[in-house]
Amino acid sequence: MSDQKNWDAVMIKIWRNNGNLMDAMFLFNRVLGKRATDCDPPLKRFPPGGFPWKVGVKVFVSSYLPKISTWLWDHDADRDIDLLRKLEGSNYDCMEKARADAELKKAYKETATNTEKIAMAHLAYTNRNNDTNWNIVKGSRVRRQK
């Protein structure tokens, strides 16, 4: 059995048991005796770098592998072997979501830049007359000397 097929089986088992990705990593390590990150070739349906390991497998699968999530919700556990057979020859991976994340980060950066521009324009508008405002130049309370 290949590393990818073992990883898929572990993911399905942990998905059915409501575990998190750390549970899947421990189970994979226990079954094969090696870490999932050390597989050659790399696993196709593996969380991207920097992904938190305490996240539930259902959350990861629904976010990054929506077709598999839909299939698991629609079918009982006795049909999981059919899913494993379909995934064995499949090239379905997490890369589509990774591209969407890059687009989302780009849009967020543009929004943040626009927010900064708006804030600077607002600050310039509110400070437009401060050069001639006596309260700004001398202070609001000028002491009189006797």
Image: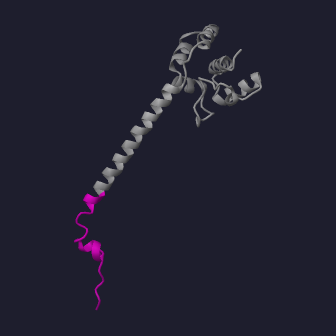
**Please, which colouring scheme is shown?**
one colour
Examine the image and state in which quarter residue 18 appears. top right
Predominant secondary structure in magenta?
loop
Specify whether 29 is left or right of 142: right
Residue 30: percent from the left, percent from the top? 76, 25
Q: Is residue 14 above or below residue 125?
A: above
Residue 80: percent from the left, percent from the top? 62, 11
Residue 126 is covered by the magenta coloring? yes
The quadrant of the picture occupied by the N terminus is top right
Residue 70: percent from the left, percent from the top? 52, 15
- For the residue pair 63 and 42, the one nearer the viewer reads as 42
**From which residue to which does the magenta span run?**
123-146
Q: Is residue 1 above or below residue 58?
A: above
**Residue lying at 53% horizontally and 11% vertically, measured from the top left:** 74
Examine the image and state in which quarter residue 105 appears. top left
Specify whether 1 is left or right of 44: right
- Furthest-front residue in view? 41
- For the residue pair 47 and 141, the one nearer the viewer reads as 47
The quadrant of the picture occupied by the C terminus is bottom left
- For the residue pair 126 and 89, the one nearer the viewer reads as 89
Total marks in image: 0
- Furthest-bottom residue in view? 146
**Residue lying at 53% horizontally and 25% vertically, measured from the top left:** 64
Residue 16 is covered by the magenta coloring? no
Specify whether 143 is left or right of 6: left
Examine the image and state in which quarter residue 134 appears. bottom left
Residue 79: percent from the left, percent from the top? 61, 7
**Residue lying at 37% horizontally and 42% vertically, measured from the top left:** 110
**Residue lying at 49% horizontally and 25% vertically, measured from the top left:** 96
Q: Is residue 109 above or below residue 31?
A: below
